[in-house]
Amino acid sequence: MLDKTKRENIIALIQREVVPAVGCTEPMCVALCVARATELLAMRPERITVLLSPNILKNAMGVGIPGTGMIGLPIAVGLGALIGKSAYQLEVLKDLTPETLELGKQYIREIPIGIHIKEGICDKLYVEILVEADAHQAKAVIAGTHTRFVHLEHDGQVLLDEAVSPEGEEAASVSLNFQLVHEFATTSPVDELRFILQARDYNLRAAQESLKGNYGHCLGKTIERPMAHGIFGNSIFSHIISKTALACDARMGGALIPVMSNSGSGNQGICATNPVAVYAQENENTEEETIRALVLSHLTAIYIKQSLGRLSALCGCVVASIGSSCGITYLMGGDYARICYAVKNMIANLTGMICDGAKPSCSLKITSGVSTALLSALLSMEGRHVTSAEGIIDDDVDRSIHNLTSIGADAMCATDCMVLGIMTGK
């Protein structure tokens, strides 16, 4: 068992990275920044200028804004100014009502809102907001993580000015490797890990709430229908993919339903949670096994994101599905070697899946990731895995993971630019 100090540091890392969020985290990050700038201005803005990194813009332009029935940034910006509270963090718009929504719609028709790419920055996660009214102005900047303010000023007076940490530095404050991830999840006192059940409760509740509406492409509900049961069966497999897709449908479709996120992404939180939680329920695993599997899944995703970065050209479902495959393999009775096999099987299959922004069709990618997670787990339990003679897989599991993240963080940068060009040129 790891010593108490190391365990406490890893627990603190998980609790920083696994947090509640309402709606897609990128527009909520923008709304949070608007809310903080408006609080500094201390009056309703008459003009709002929004400067974003390309990756923030990509993930915010096509996704539903919770409780609004609307897509994209203008309404998120307007509501951030009118009702947003920065103390709520990524739940910044949770006070939304039908009345304030109508005020928000009118507000964004009346005031100029400029949304542009911020030129000359290297940060993939960057939001800068300038609000102006009555010859006064205030500025707020978020960078590095979705809730970290690095610059605040009011009427030219600088109130906060911090250097932007290199991407992933905060998460990397605890240096992880895969053996450490596994040892922590499987040997730490279970009462220290019990907090992770909140992720299960949040994200399965989101799936249940999703059944009450028609969100996004209704993929989760489609898998629940008799015709789909005739194809996929009424099985653990179909239940896993339906409950994962349901939560994603609701989140991307703009439902005012909180989910537990992972590394700044609600979809990653869903994908790291629901497959493991549903498998544990239906396989009748113990509560302790469920807790350890969820911790293994979430911490694996956090570890991979340390070198990949919070936003990248690689779809986040690849990362979270690797985590869920590890958790499911553990629940199947897999040891460390079998769990490493599952990781290698996942990397061999899903590497290269692009991120083309947050949107309702993310549920399709999540379903692909979760299906692969189950396949990889089953194959690993047979003692079979992709070997170092094949593609980017290495004998060492950590090197295999870093091969994946090098491709996603570095080699796919040109892909990221092309994807954004296509999206903004339509």
Image (cartoon, rainbow, N blue to C red):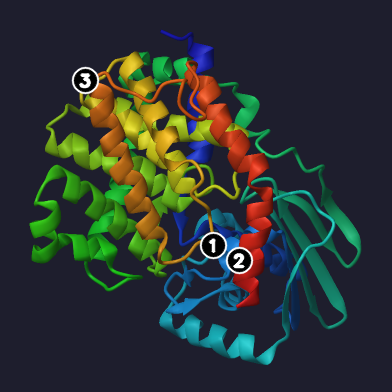
Q: Nearer the viewer, residue 301 or 135?
A: 301
* Position of residue 401 in the picture relative to residue 292 (left or right): right
Q: Amino acid at mark 2?
A: Ala
Residue 242 in sight: yes
Q: Residue at x 60, y 48 (%)?
A: 312
Q: Nearer the viewer, residue 131 or 382?
A: 382
Residue 257 in sight: no
Q: Which residue is mark 3?
A: 333
Residue neighbourhood size for the residue with mark 3, other residues' Cα within 10 Å, grouped as few (<14), some (14–19), many (≥20): few
Q: Which residue is mark 1?
A: 92
Q: Which residue is mark 2?
A: 31
Q: Residue at x 61, y 62 (%)?
A: 419
SS state under label 1: loop
Residue neighbourhood size for the residue with mark 1, other residues' Cα within 10 Å, grouped as few (<14), some (14–19), many (≥20): many
Residue neighbourhood size for the residue with mark 2, other residues' Cα within 10 Å, grouped as few (<14), some (14–19), many (≥20): many
Q: Residue at x 8, y 64 (%)?
A: 226
Comparing labels 2 and 3, the label whose residue is closer to the camera: 3
Q: Earlier in the sequence, mark 1 or mark 3?
A: 1
For marks 1 and 3, give the CA distance.
41 Å
Q: Amino acid at mark 3?
A: Gly
